[in-house]
Image (cartoon, rainbow, N blue to C red):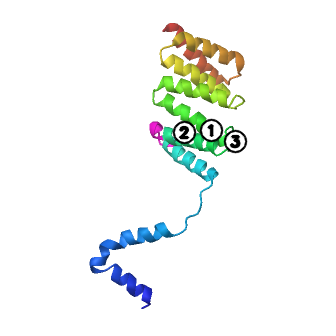
Amino acid sequence: MSHANQICGRVLSGSWRRLALPLLLLIGAASPLRAITPQESVRDARARASASFSRGAFAAAIPDFEQAVQLATANSLDPSSEAAERADNERALCDLFTGNFGAAEQAFQSFVARHPQSARAAATAVYLADCQRLGGRTREAIRSYTQALQRFAFGPDLLTDIEASLAQCWLA
């Protein structure tokens, strides 16, 4: 038996057993760690947020989406990048899906300000109007839906949804 195996055998037997885990943790803490790049941090935060989002745990996803956007901005990564844009949009959706319509409206407005040329602009305009409608502000919602219809071309399914939402506003 090697000297290392003898030492490990002694450490893991008898009274030394309770010290084994702290000792291993201390050794692990002293070993050199690989530096995490800013891009990896953003990617990790987005991955955690996306996992929560996919499970329907929208409130739990919000802090990780916010962290991903903040890390991308703080580390001088392109805040208009696809990853930052998607995290920003999904963060706003989390507020909408949790029924926090005021916060969702603000988040969608911030999204539009940060990503004016986004491919998600049309959907964001509709989500913004949905926040207003669901928050009981039907006049503002009618105005927002109408502006979205004038500004963007929508497919038949989304167009039907918008028209139904407009009808709900008029009937309220």
Q: Secondary structure at mark 3?
A: loop
- CA–CA distance between discs 3 and 1? 13 Å
Q: Secondary structure at mark 2?
A: helix
Q: Secondary structure at mark 1?
A: helix
User: What amino acid is found at the position of numbered circle 1 in the picture?
Assistant: Arg
Side (left or right) of 152 relative to 172: right
Vertical position of residue 136 compared to residue 8: above or below: above
Q: Residues within 10 Å of mark 1 (few under 14, many from 20)?
A: some
Q: Is residue 30 magenta?
A: no
Q: Residues within 10 Å of mark 2 (few under 14, many from 20)?
A: many
Which mark, by number, is residue 78? Answer: 3
Count how many numbered circles sit on residues in the image: 3
Which comes before the other along the chain, label 1 or label 2? 2
Residue 71: give x, y in percent of width and height. Answer: 59, 44
Residue 153: give x, y in percent of width and height. Answer: 71, 22
Which comes before the other along the chain, label 3 or label 2? 2
The quadrant in which residue 105 appears is top right
**Numbered disc in front, either 1 or 2:** 2
- CA–CA distance between discs 3 and 2? 15 Å
- Which residue lies under the disc numbered 2? 66
- Residues in magenta, as a range: 54-60
User: What amino acid is found at the position of numbered circle 3 in the picture?
Assistant: Asp
Contact, mark 3 vs mark 2 (Cβ under 8 Å): no
Vertical position of residue 153 compared to residue 54: above or below: above
**Residue 166: in sight, yes or no?**
no
